[in-house]
Amino acid sequence: MTDVQPGRPRRRAMWTALAVGGLLAAFILVLATRPAAETVKAHSPLLGKPAPELAGTTIDGQHIRLGNYEGRWVLVNFFATWCIPCRKEHPELIRFATRHAAVGDAAVVAVIFDDSSDAVREFRRDHGGDWPMVLDRDGAIAVDFGVSGVPESFLISPDGFVVSKLLGGVTGDRLEQLLSDAKAQTSHS
């Protein structure tokens, strides 16, 4: 006759369920208490250094270089059409790009991250955005900038230095504040 304890498997299942539930609750707590993505100004080894070379072909077949924008602030935005935060920030980028194109002090350049040019063309046709969108076919631009996901944005000074890195989706207000702060800091340098 075997010594069977019918309550032992149930107790083990209960403790396992409690442990999994506790880990899940801790994970949700971490996500719920972290700052919103648009407020996260990230550290990067590129800050204060010349921006990596950004050269490539746009979805319109034009060749572009970051150096073409010397004398203007440039927001380099890494995005993909499948990225929900990228889609949410897109109208904000349109407003920022339109405002600063009229003033002539800043421009937006997008780098397509792990996406197809056809998907991006369709996205732009449906949602707007007339700034250059550079294909990063082999991921080399993302590697040079240290990008691990999207959206990520970098503000480049008129003399070609990286002044800010933002993780997550951005808002127009956040971009305006970032640009204003950067302009003020460079005028005091």
Image (cartoon, helix red, strand yellow):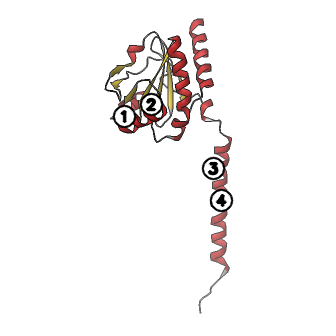
Disc with the residue nearer the chain's start (1 vs 3) = 3
- Nearest the viewer among 170 and 35 is 170
Q: Residue, x 31% and y 26% (percent of image)?
A: 61
Check if mark 1's residue and mark 3's residue have beta carbons within 8 Å: no
Disc with the residue nearer the chain's start (1 vs 2) = 1
Residue denoted by label 2: 146
Check if mark 3's residue and mark 2's residue have beta carbons within 8 Å: no
**Could you tell me residue 82's position as x and y percent?**
46, 42
The Cα atoms of the two marked residues, 1 and 2, are separated by 10 Å
**In this view, 79 is above or below 64:** below
Disc with the residue nearer the chain's start (4 vs 1) = 4
Q: As drawn, is 85 to the left or to the right of 135?
A: right
Check if mark 1's residue and mark 2's residue have beta carbons within 8 Å: no
> In the structure shown, which secondary structural element does the residue marked by tag 1 occupy?
loop
What residue type is disc 4 on?
Gly
The Cα atoms of the two marked residues, 3 and 2, are separated by 26 Å
**In this view, 26 is above or below 137:** below
Point out the residue furthest to the front here: 126
Residue 168 visible in the displayed image: no
What residue type is disc 3 on?
Phe
Q: Which mark lies nearer to you, 4 or 1? A: 1
> In the structure shown, which secondary structural element does the residue marked by tag 2 occupy?
loop
Corner quadrant of residue 132: top left
Disc with the residue nearer the chain's start (3 vs 2) = 3
Residue denoted by label 4: 21
Residue denoted by label 1: 139
What residue type is disc 2 on?
Gly
The Cα atoms of the two marked residues, 4 and 1, are separated by 38 Å
Q: Residue, x 40% and y 22% (percent of image)?
A: 52
